[in-house]
Image: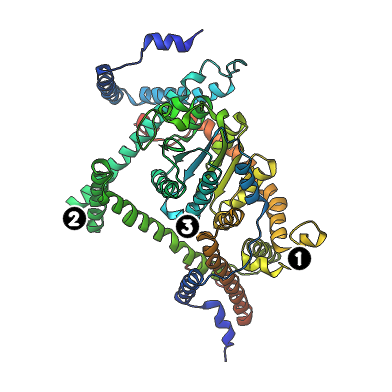
Amino acid sequence: MDLKGFLGRTFPAASGAWIWWSIILAAIGCVVVFVLLQALPGRARKFLIAAVTFLAGLFYAAEFFLPVNPETDENILTFAVPTVGNVTNVLAALTLGLGVFSLVRIHGQKVAKLREGWENSVVLLAGIVVMAVAGLGYEDSRFYRSLFRDVLNSFDAAMFATLAFFIISAAYRAFRVKSAEATLLMLAALVVMLGQIPIGQYLTHWLPEKGSFASLFRLDSISNWLLITVNAPATRAIGFGLGIGGLAIAMRLWLSLERGAFFEAKAEN
Amino acid sequence: MANPLARLDAIDRRYLYGVLLLIVVVGLLVPIPLPLAVGPQARGFYDAIENADPNKIAIVSTLWSASTQGENRPQTSVVLQHLMRKRMRFALIAFGDPQSTTLAQELAEELARENNYVYGKDWINWGFRADIAGTLKGLVRDINETIKRDSIMKKPLAEHPVMAGIHNVKDVSVIAEVSASGNYVSWLGLVVGSTDAPFCYAPTSVMAPELYTYLDSGQMKGMLFGIKGAAEYERLLGIKGFTTRAITPVSLSLVLLFVLIGLGNYGMYASRKKPSQGGTA
């Protein structure tokens, strides 16, 4: 079965004005589907969404597991991977738009009703509008670059930099050696961190870097040994646990078995 | 009379902030010239680029924003400098955070000017992609079909000389990801098995310990351990850039951390009282 050929014949690539007609028709189709979905009873809507979720999840699983033609290294679904990837990108962009819409709605109401903290909402809304206008209309302007580099980047970096102060303070207050395990943890942390910095490495710099038994006792060597021989197996074990848990959650999401979802609540009404 | 040393476990946090600020500023202004040993992870990263096939293209994937640029920007910088020194063509691609593509591009443009690298001929920006899994699966099959146009000139990829002979990940010489996130799982799961190109990772320091398992298995050929990894790479390249200077305040901050933990514990035992649980940071 030549699925690629069949789809190519049924939906030939649009060109020229047909591209715009295709976009308009697709947009109209989306609106119609949305209206139909709204008109459907809750249970039917839940079934439909579960079916779409299952099919969407099935694509990548099937593409991964189906045997490939040894000559082309492809199976019957491989040709559609870039297209499905593009669809996912469009969906991701839509969710971004949905997030912006939700933010504007909530904070717009807050400003309109002058609820507590409305001034902050004004700043947020103004920030969204100014950044969007600058980014969409004047991307190459100094104004946009200044907003991006001088304002957004600086705020972002400053927010993250304050973490260092909190880490210092939190470690000082919370790291108390009250048990054998805590002592072991602190000693391991001390050796690993000292082994990563020049000041720590300087303490044992007089030992040869490699090639002799004494080199094993350099702080950076002990730090590496702890990270590779002790830390890596522990991380691997945690990874296995997380992987199995993730698989279980993925299966539940894929088969729409997760309870308490929005559409399930709607269906029960 | 209460033991004055007992107060060591309750130093006002504003003093701690002040000391840290002082240490960082002084450390940046007056670097301590201490030797830094190059670890096997940074050397593995360096060797992967050093031994890469010059006829293929290198991929430099970025997933970082201004928040982690203190570590990720120097990491990206040393990797790009190495590629340019080797006169290897490379492609930038960004995931996760839209800031990433702009920040990496600005850095690449700056370095390209210094190294006479021409956009479209020697390097290209494939832009930001929201869908990591779909994009990576697409790269395995057909790069031109997946990326379609570059993000600066908006021209079809195939029209750029830098993409000549490049069809899929089998035509890639080395993959370097600089990230503040766990994107390596996608690369390892979807791409690494489909190409001979070595995969190297440059994460932030807090992420690095979880990656040793992949270094141990050989799935990752090298890693840059935060800013310290970038400093090691600078040493391998024989340059003294930002990270060589920045490693001093990092070292001093960690020493301060040890001293404060020691003081806190000494104060606790001196006061002979049960330590307080939790508390504000």
Residue B104, percent from left and from top: 43, 46
**Is residue B214 depicted above or below B207 in this figure?**
above
On-image quarter of the C terminus of chain A: top left
| Discs 1/3, front | 1
Distance CA(mark 2)–CA(mark 1): 69 Å
Residue at 62% over, 52% down: B209
Residue B232, percent from left and from top: 60, 56
**Is residue B34 depicted above or below A50 in this figure?**
below
Q: Which residue is mark 1?
A: A207
Q: Mark 2 falls on what kind of element?
A: loop
B157 or A127, which is in the foreground?
B157
Residue at mark 1: chain: A
A160 or A248, which is in the foreground?
A160
Residue at 34% over, 53% down: A149
Q: Which residue is mark 2?
A: A114
**Mark 1: amino acid:** Leu
Residue A194, percent from left and from top: 64, 65
Within 10 Å of disc 3 (Cα), the crowding (few <14, some 14-19, many 20+) is some
Q: Mark 3 falls on what kind of element?
A: helix
